[in-house]
Image: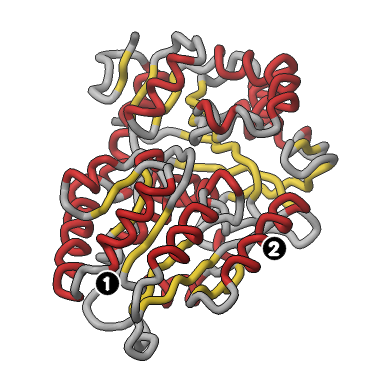
Amino acid sequence: MKSLRVLFSTGALDNPNEGPFHSVTQLADALERGGDQVTLFGTVGRDGVTSELESLARTIALRRSGPANIHFTSGLAAFGEAIRNAHCLSLHGVWVYLNHQVVASAGAAAPYMLTPHGCLKSHALQIRRWKKWVAGRMYARRLLAGARCLRALNEAEYESIRAAGLGNPVCIVPNGVRLPEIDGGGYAPHGDKRTCLYLGRIHPIKGLDLLVNAWLRVAPENWRLVVAGPAHGRRENNFLGRIRALSAGAGIEIVGPVNGARKEALLRGCDVVALPSHSEGLPMQLLEGMAYAKPLLMTRACNLPEAGAAGAALECDTAADSMEQALSAVTALDRASLAAMGMRGRELVERQFTWEHVAGDIQAVQSWIVSGGPVPASVRLT
């Protein structure tokens, strides 16, 4: 398989608290290590690119203009030659206007693969519905239809792509995760208390209120719930205010956004990683939790059934009683049982979710959309 020049286009390069930031940048890094030449385009605000991108040699950070979540830039014109020089494009996100700009600049020069990252799930489509309708009419539907291949992170996302009426070839290739050393390290336990860690955005779609309300009803003895993640915008901060009001005196700690060493310390030091989401593509924080050998508490909407099947997670529905039962069950387990669940998750990641494994599948699809030949095993034509 020959080395390719691959151009990545994504949204924000200045927000490492978003799951797609890590999945996109780590995939780009894995492809580089696998022999491809990757250039990563994305947008930034006034503060510029985050330091977590220092490992990528070719990162083009373009200043955003207009609404931040549209990711429009006026700075792309200077890079037309670099865009047209790519063998293929890898686009990330449905509503990212920069993706449309990159494809327009490339013309017919480069085929592209587009990863929706859960944007076509029915629950996600209901959020800011009229804005997405406008974006769809203006550019997003055309962008999706023109993809040589769409990438689904799992079977559920494949179904949502087909439900959206898209007939493109679809490859099913999950996100990956880096494997940390897990012998020793971490930080001292929080006294005698065990820790359930919520790691993610403070947003209604993530179901944090479902977890907090269950926590208040179950009131697990000698446990604390740590909530780590950012809240952006008025609606999200109002939601966070309601969570704070519910959490007062209930063994719930809200620590704000975490990255780098602080995030690693929380993952090493917790006993369970929880994600009560209403809609996900394939959440990085759950893969990271398993990489650190932590058991999971998650809703089925997180689309990681492999963890449940491997005995590495307790799954529940997005109904209050189901979450309460799952929380009661996981917090009743002793440390040995939790540790055993965590190791089963680590073994699952080692088998299926390393970036080396994922990058190999992506490279096969990229080669196919550029040069043709046999259809890769991950691709479904119908």
> Which disc, if any, is residue 230?
none
Quadrant of the rendered image containing residue 326:
bottom left
The total of numbered circles placed on residues is: 2
Query: Residue at the spot x=36%, y=90% of the render?
Result: 191
* Label 1 Cα neighbours within 10 Å, binned few <14 / some 14-19 / many ≥20: few
Three-letter residue code for mark 1: Glu
Quadrant of the rendered image containing residue 329:
bottom left
Q: Nearer the viewer, residue 285 or 315?
A: 315
Three-letter residue code for mark 2: Gly
User: Mark 1: which secondary structure?
Assistant: loop
Residue 172: horizontal and vertical position, in percent?
A: 33, 28
Residue 379 higher or lower than 15, as above or below:
above
**Which residue bears the numbered disc 2?**
241
> How many angstroms separate mark 2 from mark 1 (CA)?
37 Å
Q: Quadrant of the C terminus?
A: top left
**Side of 306 where 114 appears, left or right:** right
**Side of 201 where 372 appears, left or right:** left
**Which residue bears the numbered disc 1?**
181
